[in-house]
């Protein structure tokens, strides 16, 4: 049985995530302790107790989700977890790289904290937005975005999530125009998302440049298994390519549907979504229903795990 690990991205956070797991499993608590030491503040307290407003700040959310995923991963390793391929949705790609031994947890926590800071600072609060569209294919979504964009006010496809869902991202006025025109374009639903910045679009270029500079001295090892990258939707184990893709990912769309299809094509029949939430499980069920996907994040889910 070929197994894939899947790691969630921003939006999966919730106050209380990881708390019970850390109380039961020392490996999880050690993971949070390591992240706290790297950041110089109590990320664990934000995860376990909130407040929610602080946890949902992008600079906190990103390392918090990553740390929670790796806490679950390390507990499962003690229970005999093995896997042959991995992928993560947006931020989750960093978690996948830590799990595969390409990047240390310390480096990933430090850099995702910076990544979140850079992304938030790239666009002033209130000037960017994202929206989920249901019922349009990529070509129709691109046409809708082209119609809604103006010089200095772009809107672009950001997440191709599959199951008829595409997320668009850009200047708030352009996103509003796209939503207003979406029904005429054939969309069944268009809903603005509660995010603090327009991720995965050209407005994030300043963030990508700053992240590239911050990553200049990052040591990336060859991952133990192929990582299916968001930017290419193809597996890679090339450290130099991984470094470039992590920077490109900030402005490029997340090709999640194609990534799951690539995982299925590799012969995977079982996948574990590690961390908070179950968003990826739902997407995989629609994209590649032959892959049996299980979400693992809570102690009872860990207890039910069999290698």
Image (cartoon, rainbow, N blue to C red):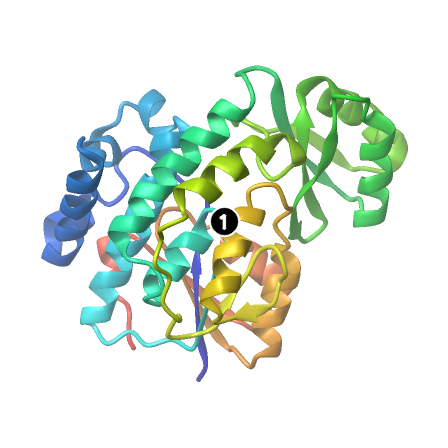
Q: Residue at x 52, y 47 (%)?
A: 247
**Left or right of 197, for residue 33:** left
Q: Position of residue 224 (x, y in %)?
A: 37, 74
Q: Position of residue 244 (x, y in %)?
A: 53, 55
Name the quadrant containing residue 274: bottom left
Residue 196 appearing in the image: no
Q: Position of residue 172 (x, y in %)?
A: 67, 20
Residue, far bottom:
1
Q: Which residue is mark 1?
A: 279
SS category of the residue bearing label 1: helix
Q: Position of residue 180 (x, y in %)?
A: 80, 22
Q: Residue at x 80, y 41 (%)?
A: 141
Q: Is residue 154 above or below residue 70?
A: above
Q: Which quarter of the figure is the N terminus placed in?
A: bottom left
**Count of labels in the image:** 1
Q: Is residue 50 above or below residue 31?
A: above
Q: Residue at x 40, y 41 (%)?
A: 214
Q: Is residue 197 above or below residue 75?
A: above
**Left or right of 81, for residue 287:** right
Q: Is residue 226 above or below residue 142?
A: below
Residue 264 appearing in the image: yes
Q: Which quarter of the figure is the C terminus placed in?
A: bottom left
Q: Residue at x 21, y 62 (%)?
A: 75
């Amino acid at each position: 049985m070929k197994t894939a690990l899947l790691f969630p991205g921003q939006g999966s956070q919730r106050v209380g995530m990881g708390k019970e797991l850390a109380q039961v499993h020392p490996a999880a608590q050690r993971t949070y302790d390591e992240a706290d030491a790297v950041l110089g503040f109590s990320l664990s307290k934000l995860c376990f107790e909130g407040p929610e407003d602080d946890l949902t700040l992008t600079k906190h959310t990103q390392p918090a989700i990553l740390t929670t995923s790796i806490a679950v991963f390390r507990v499962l390793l003690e229970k005999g977890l093995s896997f042959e391929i991995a992928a993560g949705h947006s931020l989750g790609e960093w978690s996948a790289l830590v799990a595969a031994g390409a990047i240390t947890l310390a480096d990933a926590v430090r850099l995702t904290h910076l990544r979140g800071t850079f992304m938030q600072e790239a666009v002033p609060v209130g000037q960017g937005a994202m929206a989920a569209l249901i019922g349009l294919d990529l070509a129709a979504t691109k046409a809708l975005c082209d119609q809604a964009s103006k010089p200095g006010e772009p809107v672009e496809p950001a997440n191709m999530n599959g199951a008829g869902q595409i997320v668009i991202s850009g200047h708030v006025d352009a996103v509003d125009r796209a939503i207003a025109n979406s029904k005429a374009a054939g969309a069944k639903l268009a809903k603005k998302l509660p995010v603090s910045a327009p991720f995965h679009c050209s407005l994030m270029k300043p963030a990508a440049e700053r992240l590239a500079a911050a990553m200049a001295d990052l040591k990336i090892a060859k991952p133990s298994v192929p990582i299916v990258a968001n930017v290419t939707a193809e597996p890679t184990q090339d450290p130099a390519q991984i470094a470039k893709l992590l920077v490109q990912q900030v402005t490029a769309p997340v090709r999640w549907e194609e990534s799951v299809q690539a995982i299925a094509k590799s012969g995977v029949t079982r996948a574990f979504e590690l961390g908070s939430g179950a968003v990826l499980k739902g997407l995989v069920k629609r994209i590649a229903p032959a892959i049996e996907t299980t979400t693992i994040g809570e102690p009872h889910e860990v207890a039910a795990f069999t290698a």
